[in-house]
Image: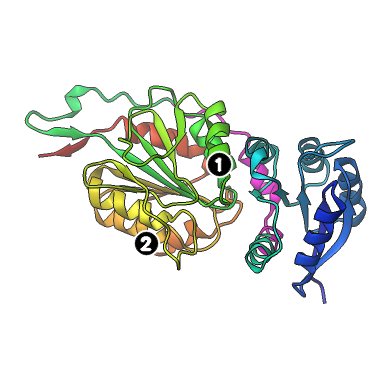
Amino acid sequence: MAGIRVIVTDDSALARSLLRDFLESDGDITVVGEARNGREAVDLVHRLQPDLVTMDLEMPVMGGLAAIEEIMASRPVPILVVSGVADAHKAFEAVSRGALEVIDKPEVGSASKRDLIAKVRMLSRVKVITHLRIRAFAPPPPVPAVGPAAVPAGATAWPRLFAIASSTGGPQVLAAILSRLPADFPCPIVIAQHIAEGFAPGMAEWLASLCAIKVRLAREDDTPLPGVAYLAPSETNVVISPGRRLTLPARGAGDIYRPSCDLLLGSVAAVCGRASVGVILTGMGSDGAAGMERIRRAGGVTLAQDEESSAIFGMNRVAIERGAIGRVLAADRIPAEMLMLAHLPVLGG
């Protein structure tokens, strides 16, 4: 019976052995090759044509970043970066070169094993050619000019708040979207990106290095400011309080996703109402669909990434099927839509 064929790449024999044991404890996964460095990984990919490669970053002969770039240019295959949290910034450099996701090196234990197996089973089905198209964005069209005359006398123009829900394949899309926004983007952005524990600070630093807008990790009691994107820590959730401040409630014992997209989007709907803009991107599962429904019911704007540009058409598909989405857009059209919405007033009494 055909199963999932994996190549494990790490310069540590102990790490390779642990990964093999974990993966092959699932009867549907077979480790068909082990590579001690990036050069061996590239050669094995061409020879064995696996369904997925796990990739360490710091290795002799050829490091993980160079190997990922060569694999994606010559024989694209889903790549899962398995690296320590200390290398988080470099791990997201790997994402920019075509890796799908990053996780911490697993430890002996059932939770690590479950997480690794779940990631491999999911990512092995991703069509990486589609995923890579996201990297080549065309310039957005000009933003329509909206002056003060658009606000009738006696009305108040409320600032919009953008809330983005994202999961597998999302970091690359977020980088492409946020890097197309100008430094003077007139609205705040809050992001719930499913991410392995400990990697959110590295992701925030990586995004900040690519973007004109500011990108930072969300902190308790932050006031969301225009031109700043706030990334939720993976160790907590993030919501908007009635006072329009960020709060970081603890994750619940039964929480499946970290952080919760539904909690963020739902809080934005409750607090900001018509000034809410929800954006749901690629990812497995249904987290975020209920929150997008709440934003739409509150009179806000809801956008979803389309199937063709999604690494995994899951969360966004569920939101679309539930009727929660106002516009479905290719990933490369989302920045222009955000710019247009940011310059349109939201009228209140």
Q: How many marks?
A: 2
- Asked whether the viewer can see residue 119, the reply is yes
Residue 68's image quarter?
top right
* Residue 220, magenta (yes or no): no
The disc labelled 2 sits on which kind of residue? Answer: Ala
> How many residues crowd mark 1 within 10 Å: few (<14), some (14–19), many (20+)?
many
Place of residue 75 in the rendered image (x, y in percent of width and height, measured from the top left): 82, 46
Indicate the secondary structure of the residue bearing disc 1: helix
Q: Nearer the viewer, residue 264 or 18?
A: 18
Indicate the position of residue 41 as horizontal and vertical percent values: 87, 47
Q: Is residue 55 left or right of residue 214?
A: right
- Quarter in which the N terminus is drawn: bottom right
- What amino acid does circle 1 point to? Val
| Disc on res. 290 | 2
Q: Residue furthest bottom?
A: 1
Specify the farthest residue to the left. Answer: 154
Q: Is residue 107 left or right of residue 193?
A: right
Residue in view at x 61 percent, y 40 percent: 134
| Residue stretch rendered in magenta on the structure | 120-141
Q: Are marks 1 and 2 in contact (CB under 8 Å)?
A: no
Residue at x 82%, y 50% (from the top left corner): 9
Q: Secondary structure at mark 2?
A: helix
Q: Which mark is residue 302?
A: none
Q: CA distance from mark 1 to mark 2?
A: 22 Å
Pointer 2 local density, CA inside 10 Å: few below 14, some 14–19, many at least 20:
some
In the image, residue 131 sits, relative to residue 24, either above or below, namely above
Q: Is residue 278 left or right of residue 312?
A: left
- Mark sitting on residue 173: 1
Residue 189 image position (x, y, % from top left): 38, 38
The residue closer to the viewer here, 21 or 192, is: 21
Which tag, 1 or 2, sits closer to the chain's start?
1
